[in-house]
Image (cartoon, grey):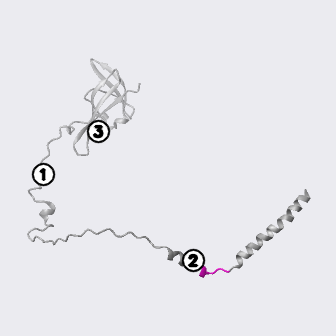
């Protein structure tokens, strides 16, 4: 084993010596900034920039402004309108507007999603729904009762499905009152 290693060492010496001679020869030639400048100059001399021609310009038609001295564009009537145009027509009454004179019911102080329907019951031919409020009290409601903070009115009680059908009134983006149907289900 020792003899193989020494033979490899004898063969590799000339190869290492040749590599060292080539490295020294590569560094021996003196290079300067002049070589770099010459290279850059010859490279730029052979290349020509390609610039597309400018698009054709459309002729501009000139117009002479003639001011009308009889009308001032910043006059108060032009900015704010005339007093006759500012007469505000009384809006027609909104048929969906809630009754402001009605006394709010107890369950109208809670949001609709905070209330929970517990079930229904029949008393003397009337169908009632039992609703639990966040304060822990159970309230009896019927068709026509109000609950929720958006003027929610109970329009139907389905005792077989355990559903309260509610019609909420809220002011839409147009400023007019709109109806939004919703329902409350019992937690069976």
**On-image quarter of the C terminus:** top left
Of the numbered discs 3 and 2, the one sitting upstream in the chain is: 2
Category of crowding for the residue at label 1, using alpha-carbon neighbours closer than 10 angstroms: few (below 14), some (14–19), many (at least 20): few
Judge left or right: residue 129 versus residue 101.
right
Circle 3 or circle 1, nearest the eye: 1
Q: Position of residue 40 (x, y in %)?
A: 55, 77
Q: Mark 2 touching mark 1, by CB under 8 A?
A: no
- The residue most toward the front is 46
Q: In this view, does 3 lie above or below 102?
A: below
Nearest the viewer among 42 and 163 is 42
Find the distance from the CA under tag 3 to the CA under tag 1. 29 Å
Q: What stretch is highlighted in magenta?
A: 30-35
Q: Name the residue under label 3.
A: 150
Q: Is mark 2 on a helix, strand or loop?
A: helix
108 drawn magenta: no
Category of crowding for the residue at label 3, using alpha-carbon neighbours closer than 10 angstroms: few (below 14), some (14–19), many (at least 20): many
Find the distance from the CA under tag 2 to the CA under tag 1. 83 Å
Q: Mark 1 points at which residue?
A: 88
Q: Position of residue 23 (x, y in %)?
A: 73, 73
Q: Mark 2 points at which residue?
A: 39
Residue at the image position 23 percent from the left and 41 percent from the top: 177
Judge left or right: residue 11 versus residue 79.
right
């Amino acid at each position: 084993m020792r003899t193989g290693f020494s033979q490899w060492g004898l063969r590799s010496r000339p190869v290492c010596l040749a590599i060292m001679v080539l490295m020294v020869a590569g560094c021996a030639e003196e290079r300067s900034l002049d070589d770099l400048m010459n290279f850059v100059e010859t490279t730029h001399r052979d290349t020509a920039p390609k610039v597309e021609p400018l698009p054709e310009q459309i002729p501009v038609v000139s117009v002479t402004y003639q001011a009308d001295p009889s009308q001032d564009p910043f006059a108060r009537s032009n900015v704010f309108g005339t007093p006759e145009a500012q007469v505000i027509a009384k809006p027609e009454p909104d048929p969906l507007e809630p009754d402001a004179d009605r006394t709010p019911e107890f369950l109208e102080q809670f949001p609709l999603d905070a209330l929970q329907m517990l079930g229904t019951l029949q008393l003397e031919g009337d169908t009632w729904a039992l609703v639990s409020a966040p304060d822990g009290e159970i309230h009896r409601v019927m068709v026509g009762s109000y609950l929720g903070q958006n003027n929610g009115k109970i329009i139907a009680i389905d005792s077989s499905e355990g559903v309260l059908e509610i019609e909420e009134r809220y002011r839409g983006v147009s400023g007019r009152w709109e109806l939004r149907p919703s329902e409350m289900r019992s937690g069976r």
